[in-house]
Amino acid sequence: MNRLRQLREERHITQEELAFELNTSQQRISKIERQLVPMGEEMIRNCARFFGVTADYLLGISDVQMQIGIEFSNIKGLMDGPMQDILFYYKSYNETQRSLIKEIAKVIAGYYHESDEK
């Protein structure tokens, strides 16, 4: 089965809903799922980000999804460029690297919290 279709069905969304999220047409999603047209670089990137998987998983090169446990795509405004980049790289890190990033974020948040109190 096509990975795009598999991911879409696992999320219980229609081709129309996915097309809306990816700013494309239902017909294009259908053609991609039936392997009548290639995804293209931008579509691969958008689908990987939307589903929280690697491009390799989406293309069937790898069986490792590397998903993030929280669905950020449904939070309006959060998935703007910089946040997408952060999440894209974060999901590729192992648990040790993720823990380090969390600790750095806590230090930064603490710094800004202290600055607000002054």
Image (cartoon, rainbow, N blue to C red):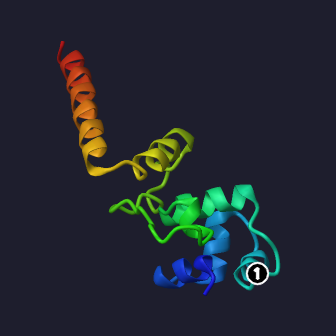
Q: Which residue sits furthest front?
A: 61
Badge 1 marks a residue whose secondary structure is: loop
Residue flagged by tag 1: what amino acid is it?
Answer: Gln
**Where residue 102 sits: x, y (%)?**
26, 39
Q: Which residue is drawn at the image coordinates 52% and 68% (left, top)?
A: 62
Look at mark 1 in the image and give the residue it sits on: 35
Q: In the shown orientation, is residue 59 left or right of residue 107?
A: right
The residue closer to the viewer here, 22 or 57, is 57
Q: Which residue sits furthest top?
A: 118
Q: In the shown orientation, is residue 7 left or right of residue 111?
A: right
Could you tell me which quadrant the C terminus lies in? Answer: top left
Q: Is residue 115 above or below residue 85?
A: above
Q: In the shown orientation, is residue 47 left or right of residue 72?
A: right
Q: Which residue is drawn at the image coordinates 67% and 72% (left, top)?
A: 19
Q: Is residue 7 above or below residue 72?
A: below
**Where residue 89 sits: x, y (%)?**
46, 45
**Where residue 75 sits: x, y (%)?**
43, 57
Q: Which residue is drawn at the image coordinates 59% and 78% (left, top)?
A: 3
The residue closer to the viewer here, 25 or 117, is 25
Figure disc tally: 1
Q: Which residue is drawn at the image coordinates 47% and 83% (left, top)?
A: 10
Rendering quarter of residue 100: top left
The residue closer to the viewer here, 74 or 34, is 34
Q: Crowdedness of circle 1 by 10 Å Cα count: few (<14), some, many (20+)?
A: few
Could you tell me which quadrant the N terminus lies in? Answer: bottom right
**Where residue 57 sits: x, y (%)?**
54, 67
